[in-house]
Image (spheres, rainbow, N blue to C red):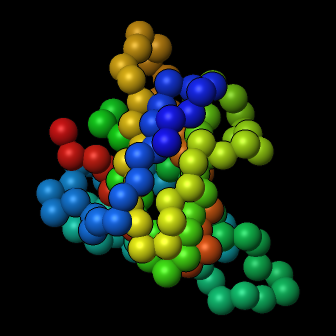
Amino acid sequence: MACGRVPSSLGTAVAEPPADPGPAPTVDAVAGGETTPSDGCLEFAPAPAGPAEPAPALELTVPADGLVITAADGSATVSVRRFAAGFPEQTAGRVAAGGTGLLAFRPDLAPAPWHARVVPEERVTVCGAPS
């Protein structure tokens, strides 16, 4: 799915995380769950529901080649930002349960990296996209 307001794309398909992922994304923030490194990827598992738990979310710096996002048992929404301090309410796309999405940006001259916020319903795996 292409996003009309930023030069990005979030294509989705049913697939597994890449066998040879690119560099692991840098974690900017984690809420309502835990991340675990796994073969160059990050696995995020939401915490069990509780009265004081924040909504599960994973914020990352997007590597130059993009991200591969695999949603396990529930879907995940993805928001992106580059120059703003916070993420917009409008999402860039959604990865369906059991599916995999590629988030990639066209190269340009700005040196600032893109950032992504992944909000999963269940477990999600995020890898750097292979070159």
x and y percent of residue 43 in the render? 41, 71
Residue that protrudes farthest toward the top in the picture: 109
Residue 33: quadrant of the picture: bottom right
Above or below for 125 versus 130: below
Above or below for 54 versus 103: below
User: Can the viewer see residue 62 in this picture?
Assistant: no
* Left or right, residue 20 beside residue 95: left
- Compare residues 120 and 30 and report the one nearer the observer: 120
User: Can the viewer see residue 43 in this picture?
Assistant: yes
* Left or right, residue 57 beside residue 16: right
Above or below for 45 versus 118: below
Residue 77: quadrant of the picture: bottom right
Residue at 49 percent across and 72 percent down: it is 97
x and y percent of residue 60 in the render? 50, 49
Residue at 72 percent across and 88 percent down: it is 49
Above or below for 67 versus 39: above
Q: Quadrant of the C terminus?
A: top left
Residue at 48 percent across and 54 percent down: it is 27
x and y percent of residue 116 in the render? 54, 45
- Compare residues 89 and 93 and report the one nearer the observer: 93
- Compare residues 93 and 126 and report the one nearer the observer: 93
- Compare residues 1 and 102 and report the one nearer the observer: 1
Residue that protrudes farthest toward the right in the picture: 51
Residue at 65 percent across and 89 percent down: it is 48
